[in-house]
Amino acid sequence: MRTTATRSRASLGGPDPLTKYLFPSLGLNLPGSLTFFVNADADQNDGPYRYVENQFFHPIQHRIELNGFLGGVMNGLGYQYTDKLKNDFTFNTKIKYDISTSDQISYSYRASLESRHDFNQVWKYLADSSLLTASLGIQHTLLWQHFFTQNSFLRVNFGKVEQHDGNDVAGVSPAQYSSAYQYLDPAGTGFNQLGTSQDWLNALTNVYTLRVDFNSQVHPLHLLKVGAEFNYEEISSTEIEYPTVSLTDSNGNAIYPPFPAYLDRNSGDYPGYGRYRWHMLDYPNRGAAYVQDNIEFSGLNLHVGLRYDYFDIGRQVYSPDFVNAWISDLNDPSTPDSLKLLPQWTKNAPDGNSFAYYVLHGYFSPRLSIGYPVTDKIVFYFNYGHFLQFPDRNEYFNDPTVNGNNTIGNPDLKPQRTVSYEAGFEDQFREDMAFALHAFYKDNFDYPVLFGRAGNSFYRNFDYASTRGFELTFNESYSTNLSTSLSYSYQIAKGRSSDPLASIFTPQYELPRETRLNFDQNHTANVFIRYSVSPTEPGKFFGLPFVNNYGISLTWSFGSGLPYTPYVGQTSGYRNVYLVNSETKPYTSTVNLSMYKGFLVMDHLNMQVTLDITNLFNRLNVINVVNNTGAPAKYGDFDPTTGIIYPWYYTDYRLDPSNFSDLRQIILGLKLNWD
């Protein structure tokens, strides 16, 4: 299947021309120096599989709309694009002002826009009814650095991250969705002919960050690093499912949206719509402080550190409405009081004064690193550390206002903890050859997992996982023109479940037994070979003179198969837990080729014609398999769940072409380099 892709990149940087050239010519000399950097990328790709282009599929003209002052400048340019299935745009700029030898200040602005209309086999002929997703991220960073001495400096960083996320159907409001959500394929073709996707999301998150770091060589043997950070979050999100589907009251009568207020479906955007809806409006904050001492003895480098983190879930979850709804939705009326699930977080700060409590009840994370240089080219090392990851905010705050089989947030969640060990050595045999061996072991605790209660679900810290393995790397530069890099890694990743929903749909996952995780890929290998000749070198091309300014590189990536659960028959039982992820999918292998030829247009201006070929041999790398065959579905396969042998005309979702990774793509480009 032929697809199209366009990629554009441009960057510009250097001294500011106003303060560097114009102002001095007018007799105005500003102290210090001002530099800038600007970069813009645009990538659009239909991927290897597309929707059928018929009367149902209409690519849309969009304008890029960014926020902030620089975003307004970009908007003023009026850039428009015709959407493809995947559209990615990024814009970066940085302005740095070296006021003096002791003070520096810089401002960075980054904007990224992504819109996707991923291929979905069941909506192949009704593409406008499938789900569109989009995200816009805006990041501002203001940095000030002050050097007290050559060995001591202070860094103050203030930033804001603004993240917009959403999905919808064809850009319409929830009130315009189709109410058809069942029997979408009346003809039994395997493709939907009725209805629309039933999801709608609008989310905005603002995160304000203040970070202060101080570094000082307080002693010839001690480099001290201390720092602290504070983050304040503003979270607003509305998620709606089945926006226009009716409800049934206690008398069996249908109630159509917009629903009346007493049905508790009015919080957030588009009140009154949605059989299920979740709304978040929360203002949590988190912070951290750390201290680290880098000790350098003769023949031994020792790094010792300690980090302290806290997370304040905010006052919103202490409101009577949230607490009462949480108790009501997670406890059946017939449950005895002694067995009722009660909100534990309300006991921590009964007066709603959560900030002081959470600041004083945080988490310590020790860090240790030891480096032992045997010679100037051989070094052994060992690293040990504790790391925290706070759960997604919806796992804390999902609003408990809708009865039914929905997910309710649990503000009493603890962060996920990882205890990491790593050891290895690095050896540089020669100036042009190096080898490294790294061994690692990670324990992961307190993964949040969904548990059912009174027809609803809520998160609990329950799961455990571990990852262990090693990695070998080898790098060599045979000459100034030819270089190679080889790497191989082996790992084992096991846990009690790969999916937080597992304990809902397969309660046997509550047994304390580890199985292979979905991302457990035991073997990976990568080979990179590059040959290049610079514009100033003599010609080197199989003995031909006067041929230079070119390059060619070849990469090969190999991965052993990921696990899957084999078909276990129509019966289910606790014995089946031993078969979870017990089989392995086929391995993957991909070869990519890149070439360029440059032409010196004038001094310092080099024009390059580039050719990039991904998946050079057009290999069908398998992503999804049928669990009774261990391979993608094909004509003639037998489906044990239906008793059907796939005939040549059998075209349901099991024959989805996206069961394979991207096919060969050839990209021709033009690049201008100004040195």
Image (cartoon, helix red, strand yellow):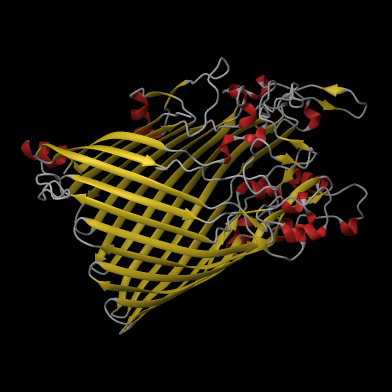
Q: Nearer the viewer, residue 342 or 415?
A: 415
Who's the residue at 54% across and 30% down the image? Answer: 117
Describe residue 317's horizontal placement relative to residue 421 as left or right. right
User: On the image, which quarter does residue 180 sit in?
Assistant: top right
Q: Nearer the viewer, residue 10 or 52?
A: 52
Q: Nearer the viewer, residue 524 or 166?
A: 524
- Image spot of residue 92 (x, y percent): 34, 40
Inspect this view and state whether residue 581 appears. Answer: yes
Describe residue 250's horizontal placement relative to residue 422 as left or right. right
In the rendered view, would you say 553 is above or below 221?
Answer: above
Describe residue 450's horizontal placement relative to residue 88 as left or right. right
Who's the residue at 67% across and 56% down the image? Answer: 581
In the rendered view, would you say 370 is above or below 650?
Answer: below
Q: Nearer the viewer, residue 611 or 307?
A: 611
User: On the image, which quarter does residue 175 sit in?
Assistant: top right
- Image spot of residue 541 (x, y percent): 17, 48
- Image spot of residue 58 (x, y percent): 52, 18
In the rendered view, would you say 279 is above or below 508?
Answer: above
User: On the image, which quarter does residue 271 sit in?
Assistant: top right
- Image spot of residue 440 (x, y percent): 50, 70
